[in-house]
Image: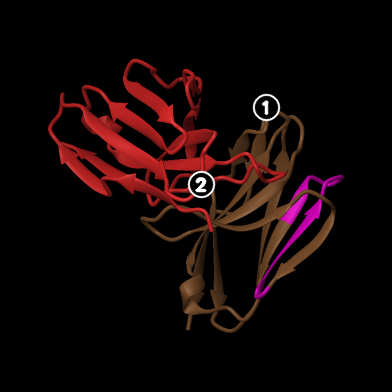
Amino acid sequence: GQNIDQPTEMTATEGAIVQINCTYQTSGFNGLFWYQQHAGEAPTFLSYNVLDGLEEKGRFSSFLSRSKGYSYLLLKELQMKDSASYLCAVMDSNYQLIWGAGTKLIIKP
Amino acid sequence: GAVVSQHPSWVICKSGTSVKIECRSLDFQATTMFWYRQFPKQSLMLMATSNEGSKATYEQGVEKDKFLINHASLTLSTLTVTSAHPEDSSFYICSASSGTTSYNEQFFGPGTRLTVL
């Protein structure tokens, strides 16, 4: 079967750095997405990785290792507004998105 | 950027009634639209995928006669929850893809919160 694993909840301090991991087992791979979702709102796109390596976009970076079935989202200089759920999703061989359950990130002052 | 709207944002209805939710791509043509359902503290669950002008493809376990999907144009898809019951109360989110990016990026609407009394 297809499976996406990510931690249920993480806590970090304002101004610090946090890494949210995601491991996946899917039938085929056409890229991995990270989305941010604030409570009661729809997800917003953060990043897309299809090749191995690190993609940096401002305070957020995303890393992919296809051989390990592993990705992480790195958030630097954390702000209170970064408190949200972070969803990892993999596009399989049929170009369908397989979603993880999301990681709830709590930022403390 | 690509914008997707949903209407209504929230709706409360009585058990047994039908509710229609609209999803519109405002500044691009959506060749494919997706309907998701999300229960509290859970991830998105894909309900169905629809391509303009053709019948929707429903995920296993989703009743197509209960969740009617119409994708009549390249900018509009509708989801009708027929004979809604309290267990249908959920957050319904649509997304749209133009098919023009190499990774078929999905742009999400703001969601519709349905409460069935």
Q: Amino acid at mark 2?
A: Phe
Label 1: chain letter? A
Name the foreground residue: A10 vs A2: A2
Q: Which residues are magenta?
A: A58-71
Which chain is displayed in red in the rendered image?
Answer: B
Residue A70 lies within the magenta run? yes
Residue A14 in the image, given as x and y percentages of width and height:
54, 82
Q: Point out the image quarter for the C terminus of chain B.
A: top left
Which residue is the site of mark 1?
A1
Q: Residues within 10 Å of mark 1 (few under 14, many from 20)?
A: few
Q: Horizontally, is B50 left or right of A15 in the view?
A: left
Residue B28 numbered mark, or none: 2
SS under mark 2: loop
Q: Amino acid at mark 1?
A: Gly
| Residue occupying the point 26% across, 41% down | B114
Name the foreground residue: A7 vs B23: B23
Label 2: chain letter? B
Residue B39 lies within the magenta run? no
Which chain is displayed in brown in the rendered image?
Answer: A
